[in-house]
Amino acid sequence: MLIALLPGDGIGPEVIAQAVRVLDAAGCGLTFETAPVGGAAYKAAGHPLPASTLDLARRADAILFGAVGDPECDALERHLRPEQAILGLRKELGLFANLRPVKLFADLADASTLRPDVARGIDMVIVRELNGDVYFGEKAMRTTPEGLREGYDVMSYDEGEVRRIAHSGFQTARARRGKLCSVDKANVLETSQLWRDVVIEVAADYPDVALSHMYVDNAAMQIVRDPAQFDVIVTGNLFGDILSDLASMCAGSIGMLPSAALDTSSKGLYEPIHGSAPDIAGQGKANPLATILSAAMMLRYSLDMAEAADRIEAAVAGALASGARTPDLGGAMDTAAMGDAVIAAL
Ligand code: GGG
């Protein structure tokens, strides 16, 4: 099985290196090929997503992605900025369904920002749509008749885009506790009204799933008030991006949350939800667990290696139970030492 390794920027290469060590130690027998992406690719090849990187992503059985984002690229035109690489990969490969599991490991209750009695029982999946919304709508700067600069980003969804992510949400809920909460802003936005209408239509195919609806502002409040009420949340690109960062702190750290970006085949792109964290890059402070857990998702969803995925997830729990903590979790362990702790627990 060929894995495209796209480490990217900042802490990306550091966390990917630990995930590769763990996959090797677990005896997965994978072949890795590495290509530049993001700011690193712009600096090396003049584009954040070079054709050769896209080609590798297409050829591979799965993609393990680190992070993109580089302050040295802030002044570039938008289409050359590092973030365009991940948006481009998702779009080019048709990866529209982003599964973001939010789980509090038993030994991390002390790291959650929530009171232990509230944090207990956090176990949800946020299903974020990845190919539409303001991320891909027309965007530009213009000047108003009064001479003021005005920026705009068009938010749009067509019903086909909503329908397919709604199916992903229902199927994810059906395989778990059977509860789906669709998050929108239907009291204000046309896109959200369409979203709600289509989700209700799709619900007819899933009579066994209990569907509820929540406005995104209320959802943000409810996630920190009572996260255990959620099983699966399905939502748009922007709302899902924001809510999953919020939820990550309930689970102890943004360094703990993995993700899978899927199409309707077994092909997938797996990445930690965190970005490139340039402020701690190169210092060995990054938590590699989100990337290691993303690698486990890759084994489960793309490579049909569920047993190895289970072992790696159990090893992460074991490392945390043994007291392994990077600085984001209140400890002093460095990135490689956390990788060692997971391998020791395998
Ligand atoms: N590993 C996630 C990452 O690199 N995030 C940076 C980023 O630009 N994300 C945009 C997005 O997830 O939509």
Image: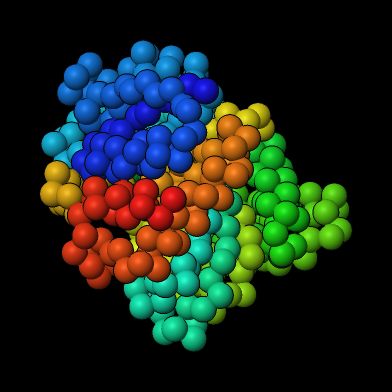
**Residue 18 vertical placement versus 77 (above, below):** below
Q: Work out whether residue 50 can be spotted.
A: yes
Q: Quadrant of residue 178?
A: bottom right
Which scheme is used to colour this image of the protein?
rainbow
Q: Residue at x 36, y 78 (%)?
A: 110
Report x, y in % for residue 80.
27, 26
Q: Residue at x 45, y 40 (%)?
A: 26
Foreground pick, 24 / 297? 24
Q: Residue at x 40, y 35 (%)?
A: 24
Residue 8 falls left or right of residue 107: left
Q: Residue at x 13, y 49 (%)?
A: 283
Foreground pick, 151 / 78? 78
Residue 70 falls left or right of residue 22: left
Report x, y in % for residue 315.
45, 55
Q: Work out whether residue 131 can be spotted.
A: no
Foreground pick, 39 / 177? 177
Report x, y in % for residue 154.
47, 41
**Residue 108 vertical placement versus 40 (above, below):** below
**Residue 234 vertical placement versus 134 (above, below):** below
Report x, y in % for residue 319.
37, 60
